[in-house]
Image (tube, rainbow, N blue to C red):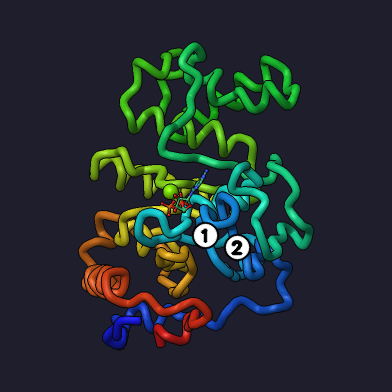
């Protein structure tokens, strides 16, 4: 094996971030999502490809809050695989090895307790904004009047007042994404799974969507997993940031960050955010601990 230089030691944490490192959630709290050495391989024998290996973490059900977990890592490191396993979606689900639990029970299929939003928005082109938002309620047998009322309320919450009867093709990318988010949140999932949801939006709309997400998340108290390519977005949104590395896809680090208390625009100007962004980018580029070396949050102290 070729000699590889030792990974550079991680730099220090900006003071504001170090101060935000709380004690890990009490073990007494109920476990909401548990991954215990979860491995997923695609294909058989010599063609088998490991998507994620031995991924372990616990997310507790913190009363009246809900945690926001941001997942970052290079392309192909298994971020979508982690989300789709939680969602119970094939072919990523079921994993090849390891245990996953949701509310203390093994996951066996998709369920209304989990909602997924991805980059493709998956709106129905022949349905209006309100009908798209109300679609899941219709499947649940909610009456026409009630679902229209609730969908209109949600259209308003996500800033689509006046666009209720438009079709997806008449909307901008940002508006379509608002419809997709409303269509998922109206079902009040306990766990919200977002796979690069803002990837296709321009920076200004993206910041508005981040702020909207934080506001809706505080209202709904859901636990959110959000995959993002933007390190800054991960730090702004995440209570914890899961950093993954590729080949094999694995979880290498967990960082706690302060909760967003101001808009992304204001938060961006705070020096610690820039410092932490630089440090996390550096770690993504240079620091890929081997499997089994997950340092946990201690590394950031
Ligand atoms: P990320 O979201 O971090 O880019 P993915 O979770 O999509 O990564 O993929 C992780 C690995 O699993 C990649 O090597 C990818 O090629 C492989 N993979 C993902 N989905 C499938 C699939 N349906 N069939 C075969 N391999 C897959
Ligand atoms: Mg992906």
Compared with 73, 126 (above or below) is above
Q: Position of residue 182 (x, y in %)?
A: 51, 34
Instruction: Looking at this view, name the residue that lies furthest to the front.
Output: 46
Asked if residue 28 lies left or right of residue 154, the reply is right
Q: Are marks 1 and 2 in contact (CB under 8 Å)?
A: yes
Q: Position of residue 87 (x, y in %)?
A: 62, 47
Compared with 148, 52 (above or below) is below
Q: How many marks?
A: 2
Residue, x 25% and y 73% (percent of image)? 282
Say what secondary structure mark 2 lies in: strand
Residue at label 1? 50
Asked if residue 257 lies left or right of residue 97, the reply is left
Label drawn at residue 283: none
Front position in the image: 202 or 246: 246
Mark 1 and ligand 1: say if the CB distance to the nearest ligand atom is below 8 Å: yes
Residue at label 2? 39
Residue, x 60% and y 24% (percent of image)? 134
């Amino acid at each position: 094996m070729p000699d590889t230089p030792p990974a550079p030691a991680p730099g220090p944490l900006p003071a504001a971030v170090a101060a935000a490192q709380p004690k890990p959630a009490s073990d007494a709290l109920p476990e909401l999502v548990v991954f215990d050495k979860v491995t997923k391989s695609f294909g058989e024998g010599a063609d088998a490809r490991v998507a994620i290996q031995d991924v372990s973490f616990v997310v507790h059900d913190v009363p009246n809050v809900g945690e926001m977990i941001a997942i970052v890592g290079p392309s192909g490191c298994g971020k979508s695989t982690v989300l789709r396993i939680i969602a119970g979606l094939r072919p990523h689900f079921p994993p090849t090895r390891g245990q996953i639990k949701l509310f203390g029970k093994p996951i066996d299929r998709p369920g209304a307790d989990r909602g997924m939003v991805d980059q493709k928005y998956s709106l129905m082109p022949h349905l209006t904004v309100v009908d798209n938002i109300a679609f899941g309620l219709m499947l649940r047998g909610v009456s026409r009047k009630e679902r229209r009322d609730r969908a209109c309320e949600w259209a308003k919450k996500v800033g689509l007042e006046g666009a209720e009867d438009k079709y997806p093709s008449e909307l901008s990318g940002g508006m379509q994404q608002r419809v997709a988010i409303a269509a998922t949140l109206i079902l009040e999932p306990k766990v919200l799974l977002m796979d690069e949801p803002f990837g296709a939006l321009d920076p200004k709309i993206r910041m508005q969507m981040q702020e909207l997400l934080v506001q809706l998340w505080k209202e709904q108290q859901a636990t959110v997993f959000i995959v993002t390519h933007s390190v800054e977005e991960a730090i702004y949104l995440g209570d914890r940031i899961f950093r993954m590395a590729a080949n094999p896809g694995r979880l290498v680090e967990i960082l706690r960050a302060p909760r967003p208390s101001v808009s992304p625009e204001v938060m961006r100007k705070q020096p610690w955010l820039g410092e932490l962004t630089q440090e996390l980018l550096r770690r993504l580029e240079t620091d890929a601990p081997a499997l089994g070396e997950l340092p946990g949050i201690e590394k950031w102290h």
